[in-house]
Image (cartoon, rainbow, N blue to C red):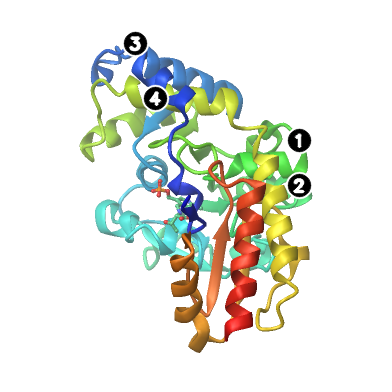
Amino acid sequence: MKIIDLRSDTVTRPTDAMRSAMAMAEVGDDVYGEDPTVNRLEALAAKIIGTEAALYVSSGTQGNLLALFSHCRRGDEYIVGQEAHTYKFEGGGGAVLASIQPQPVHFESDGRLDLDKVAKMIKPVDDHFARTRLLCLENTHNGKVLPLDYIETVRPFVDRYGLKLHLDGARIFNAAIKLDVPVTQLTAPFDSISFCLSKGLGAPVGSVLCGNRDFIRRARRWRKLLGGGMRQAGILAAAGIHALENHIDRLTDDHENARILAEGLSVFPDLTIDPDTVQTNMVFFSIDPEKSEALTTHCRSQGILVSGQGEFRLVTHLDITREDIDRVIETFETFFNET
Ligand code: TLP
């Protein structure tokens, strides 16, 4: 029985074509800057994202951390979403390792940070306060795409306050595909952008941090300090190149599958779910917490992996087909028929 893993889009396995690209990759020592495949990935990523330079990093977490290190200094502050990955799910790395203080602000329901609320958090220049240096946004956030007109207002805002602007664009291609705009339209206002190769794009490992040459030079040094300088990393970078060349446009399939899944699940009265809120590859629903474990166990017994407690997130990706979606909906149906 095929396992249908909906816990995240991080779980994809490399396709055969990706594996052969990896096996054939030309390699060298990337700490010397001599891995031709890593160099090719970085050049390709910079071109696609629209920045001068890029740096291949081990994970999205490392990309975001390097952005904090490279924009801020000890005693500085960054403003970030309360539920943002960069703040909530990255072990407090900026504070722990770089002595940078986070200032969280609650997200609006569409994934924006309200700029009036952000403005109130910016500290005056005064010895009492940390120096507010950076604003971090996330796109997509919980599968939601930042509105285009909002993105356009953010650059003038940060310029007014002398802040830098970082994007956790782990799933930025999902946003671009959803809006049907060039990804550069979503990245242009930012000083730095981190995006993941190992989520919807289907590579086994890796993210890329993009920015101008100076910024990337600083990030490269911090990456080394953090133990992230890899040697013959071209084997992995080849998967990233393959992903960028072959797996961007197909994200529409994931979005379509997520929509069909949400509509299929919305018929069950025990679930609270609104299919109209599904924009990309994530479906959220809630269920009586007392039924959570039974649902998870039932799904697992049918080869379907889901995670959540009361609140569930189901994520579609490269390894999920339209038929799998039907199987998931049928499995939920048997669960509700039996309970
Ligand atoms: N997110 C993972 C979990 O850590 C929650 C997931 O399954 O969604 N930014 C965003 C918006 C992310 O969702 C993630 C991973 C990251 C950064 C970090 O990427 P990695 O896992 O490569 O460090």
Q: Which residue is mark 2?
A: 148
Q: Which mark is residue 221?
A: none
Is the residue under label 1 in contact with that under label 4 (CB below 8 Å)?
A: no
Q: Of circles 4 and 2, which is in front?
A: 4
Residue 182 to residue 6: above or below: above
Q: Residues within 10 Å of mark 3 (few under 14, many from 20)?
A: some
Distance between the alpha carbons at the discs numbered 4 and 3? 10 Å
Q: Quick check: 91 left or right of 192? A: left
| Element on which disc 2 rests | helix
Q: Is mark 2 within 8 Å of ligand 1?
A: no
Q: Residue at x 40, y 61 (%)?
A: 89
Q: Is residue 199 shown to the viewer in this render?
A: yes
Across and down, in percent, residue 180 comes to 77, 38
Distance between the alpha carbons at the discs numbered 2 and 1? 10 Å
Q: Earlier in the sequence, mark 1 or mark 3?
A: 3
Q: Of circles 2 and 3, which is in front?
A: 3
Q: Is mark 1 within 8 Å of ligand 1?
A: no
Is the residue under label 3 in contact with that under label 2 (CB below 8 Å)?
A: no
Across and down, in percent, residue 46 comes to 53, 24
Q: Of circles 2 and 1, which is in front?
A: 1
Q: Earlier in the sequence, mark 4 or mark 1?
A: 1
Q: Earlier in the sequence, mark 4 or mark 2?
A: 2
Q: Which residue is mark 3?
A: 26
